[in-house]
Image (tube, rainbow, N blue to C red):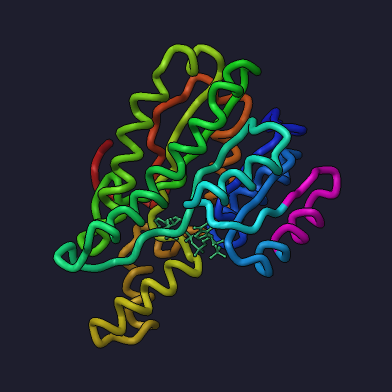
Amino acid sequence: MDLGIAGKWALVCAASKGLGKGCAEALVREGANVVITARGAEALEATAAALRALNPAVQVRAVAGDITTEAGRAAALAACPQVDILVNNAGGPPAGDFRDWSRDTWIAALDANMLAPIALIKATVDAMAERQFGRVVNITSAAVKAPYEALGLSNGARTGLTGFVAGLARQQKLASRNVTINNLLPGPFDTERLRSNTATIAQKGGQTFEALWESRRKSNPTQRFGDAREFGAMCAFICSAHTGYMTGQNVLMDGGSYPGTF
Ligand code: NAP
């Protein structure tokens, strides 16, 4: 299937590794030009080089910076001639007990996982509407549908974004002009973050990493973790020319972990 996005410009945030990188790869394969961001310049440049090798016909620009700051977002937007596709992503907040979290802890989580995506949506959707094409995908978490007890910061901040998006996506001036805003909810994907989280939880519980990793794998109906490439493929499809009639949705990719009928 031709996704119909060759030549479009995509801003993919937090994309030197993991799920963001998977999304950038899939978009580049489809012929989209990309601006990718991350804080660490070295890994970001390596990913940019790999993306250029994947499809020499597209433009790939790398902007090092913190997407949770105004300066980081301004630099990312300045590198993109126009934003046709916006993939919102950032690091997830730490696990812990809400009794230990201060107002500053909460503000940091809200900045990363709610307010940064909203600021980028604000900066881009009206121009998308004028051009009669726009796709926004927010990488959130399966925790929005079924909260993880230890990830209260993530549960709270991402659910705030989800509620906001549910209202905004249905604005007639966006939806009627082929601008869609959807959320992509990862369950357990084999990335650096999942491995480091698993190592932390294993250490706290007096388990080995291997034992916990194996039990997590076996607890998934597919008997495996997700691969960032399959996450990226789903993202690219949601960003395609074929999805103008799907907006305000939460697409769960968790190997069937969530037990509900809907
Ligand atoms: P990852 O493998 O650790 O990759 C995170 C990427 O984001 C890196 O490129 C990192 O580069 C970049 N990044 C982090 N903070 C950033 C910031 N403030 N500004 C710009 N770039 C930033 O993580 P992942 O597993 O792909 O997770 C991506 C998102 O999905 C996270 O929010 C995570 O909580 C969520 N999620 C993941 C899973 C999973 O199973 N993997 C499940 C549910 C939800 P730098 O560190 O160099 O900035």
Quadrant including the N terminus: top right
Question: Residue 48: within the magenta?
Answer: yes
Instruction: Answer above or below: position of 134 versus 113.
Output: above
Q: Quadrant of residue 86?
A: top right
Count of marks, rendered view: 0
Q: Which residues are magenta?
A: 47-61
Quadrant including the C terminus: top left
Residue 41, horizontal then vertical, whole percent: 66, 65
Instruction: Describe residue 219's horizontal placement relative to residue 240 as left or right.
Output: left
Q: 244 or 11: which is nearer to us? A: 11
Instruction: Answer above or below: position of 233 versus 189.
Output: above
Residue 143, horizontal then vertical, whole percent: 30, 51
Question: Residue 149: within the magenta?
Answer: no
Residue that appears at 47% across and 38% down: 119
Q: Quadrant of residue 228?
A: bottom right
Instruction: Describe residue 176's horizontal placement relative to residue 142 as left or right.
Output: right
Residue that appears at 45% across and 45% down: 116
Instruction: Describe residue 39's horizontal placement relative to residue 182 as left or right.
Output: right
